[in-house]
Amino acid sequence: MKTVLTSLFAAIVLVASTQKPLNPEFLWDLKRVGGVEVSPNGDRFFYKVTQYDINKNSGASKLYLSNLNGEKEEIKLPNNFAYAHQWIPNGKGIAYLSSEEGGTFLYEYNLEKKQERLVFKYKGEMSGFKYSPDGKNILFTSKVKLDQTMNDKYPNLKEANVHVFDDLMYRHWDSWTDYKYSHVFIARRSDDKTFSSVVDIMEGEKFDSPLEPFGGLEQINWNGDGTEVLYTCKKLSGKAYAVSTNSDIYAYNVANKTTQNITEGMMGYDMNPLPSPNGKLIAFASMEEDGFESDKNDIVVFDPATKKYSNLTADIDLTVSAFIWGDNNTLFFEAMIDATNQLFEIDLKTKKHRQITTGQHNYTSLALSNEGIVATKQSMKYPNEVFLVDLKSGKDKGLSKINDEFIGSMADVNIEKRMIKTTDGKDMLTWVIYPPNFDKKKKYPTLLYCQGGPQSAVSQFFSFRWNFRLMASMGYIVVAPNRRGLPGFGQEWNDAISGDWGGQAMDDYLSAIDALAKEPFVDEDKLGAVGASYGGYSVYYLAGIHNKRFKCFISHCGLFNLESWYGSTEELFFANKDIGGPYWGKDRAVSYDKHSPHNLVDNWDTPIMVIHGEKDYRVPITQGMEAYQAAQLKGIPSKFLYFPTESHWVLSPQNGIIWHKEFFKWLDKWLK
């Protein structure tokens, strides 16, 4: 018996010793699972798996068909350039788009016969499409050029490269205006095989649907019987668009070609219309306050027959991220609670809700099947995979298991959930991530992670850039607090940061790192702080108030000078709400004097690395340049990592590898 136990122990030690710590290259080797679509009859689904090739600096995707037991097969489509996959309404096949010479082609692929047929050819670019309930029509989105460029206005000066603007919103997030607008179109099936008779239901309108730049086909839908197209649009322009979040849902009548605003008078974001299974009701996501992009997101149900609205979640202190219909009296939705994204059920008549799932993970999508909810799920340890969730028990079973073997070969990390007291006596949920083979008798360099948003939870996300498992695998303890201003802890906690960027949230950060610094396994002489966006702002701000706690900083796309930022960012509703308005006039917001990091540069004395992308128009690159220049002129060891082709994020594989290499090189230099 002793021999058996000894052999078993040796085997365990051998497995542990052969496990590899996660590194940047391994992170990019992970396959990315998404695009889950359940069949119309609910018995199977397909999903997309994308894998990146570092040498080619690009990715390629495969499509898999699976039953509800997880038995899968690759769908080998004849077309290698297929995108925007959808089920055909009869459930017998999959339709998809392909950009080819002459325009965009829509194909239908029969899964049993494994045959492809062309059903629609459009001379422009299509970004997505949806079938009507009976399959006789499709709606699709495409950009329409409605504005003149300078080359159009001066046709004899074709080589001129110049733009002239006389209003705001001339650029947005990562793109300058292209003089085009995303419109919704309808095409009718002229026979049993092909679609034609294209109609632009927004003809001549200089507005976008879906909303630029992140909106997708979830913002556009058919009503229950296919007589109307429901689409999300913010019908504002220029300065009015820049200062407002007032999007509405419009109903276009296919027969009489009239359009009605069904959310008129509702002043915040209204979007994502979804008809009930019987087609009698329309559910949509709604925020109440105009100009507040992080307001509580509710599910509102509209009855077209009675013109009545019912806010199902008004009295529930949760903000909804996504929802689907169950039956005609039930909806399922995702919401953040205690730094995890869980699934819930709500009854239309009683408005009573029930939390279906629990656990240390995030559900990131949901779709209804015959046996429960098919959902993607991730955690700080594992990237997205597809699971089947039992509606009664909340238990799930893995279906895709695409990365199981790869993740199993990686050395594990431990994630601890701590409640830390803040300076105002609140309990703050803080994640602490420990390195592989953690030894509490040793001392470890430790990183304070500062979250962006600012209203974006430090939940159980698996990021391919700000990856806590990777940071821990590189030998660092990571402290990730859910400081003031994050969802999942009630709306009061979420709203507390607006107008107080440099106040309680900074105290919360310091409470978290101070609590961990007292632990014997934390080397309090080797503390660093890192973050992006508002997290980058936090790093700049902490650099001026940390009182020598930290030995180095890294700020990615952070806000440095709130005055110059207000004068160059694009969606001004965000700045007006969170900063308090412009920096001029009698009502100058106090944030410019009280909460701008550039006012604290005189206190800077710690090495800092600044990272920024040229195409970041939300936080323009001059913010990073100003911070770097200040550090250089003060003689502070500093580095500027500049990405000419990246935006607020770093998306290409080779740039991503360099980002991580330089990130850890800087940390290792000052903390190891």
Image (cartoon, rainbow, N blue to C red):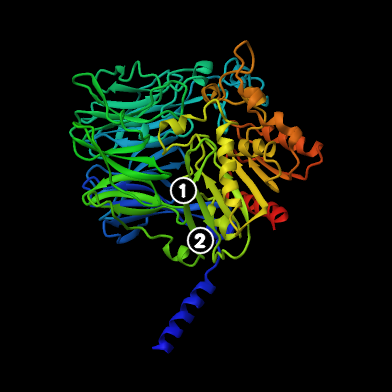
| Residue 108 can be seen, yes or no | no
Q: For the point 66% across and 34% down, which residue is it? A: 621
Residue type highlighted by circle 1: Phe
- Of badges 1 and 2, nearer the viewer stands 2
Placement of the C terminus among the 4 image quadrants: bottom right
Which class describes the residues within 10 Å of circle 1: few (<14), some (14-19), or many (20+)?
A: many
**Which residue is disc 2 drawn over?**
413
Residue type highlighted by circle 2: Val
Q: Residue furthest top?
A: 586
In the image, residue 672 above or below residue 461 = below
Location of residue 450 in the rendering, given as x and y in whole percent from the top left corner:
57, 42
Q: From the viewer's perspective, is 668 left or right of 531?
A: right
> Residue 254 — which label?
none
**Quadrant in which residue 522 is drawn:** bottom right
| Residue 484 can be seen, yes or no | yes
Q: Nearer the viewer, residue 656 or 99?
A: 656
Q: For the point 19% across and 28% down, which residue is it? A: 280
Tag 2, which secondary structure? loop
> Residue 461 — which label?
1
Q: Nearer the viewer, residue 371 or 652?
A: 371
Q: Nearer the viewer, residue 249 or 292?
A: 292
Q: For the point 37% across and 56% down, which residue is it? A: 76
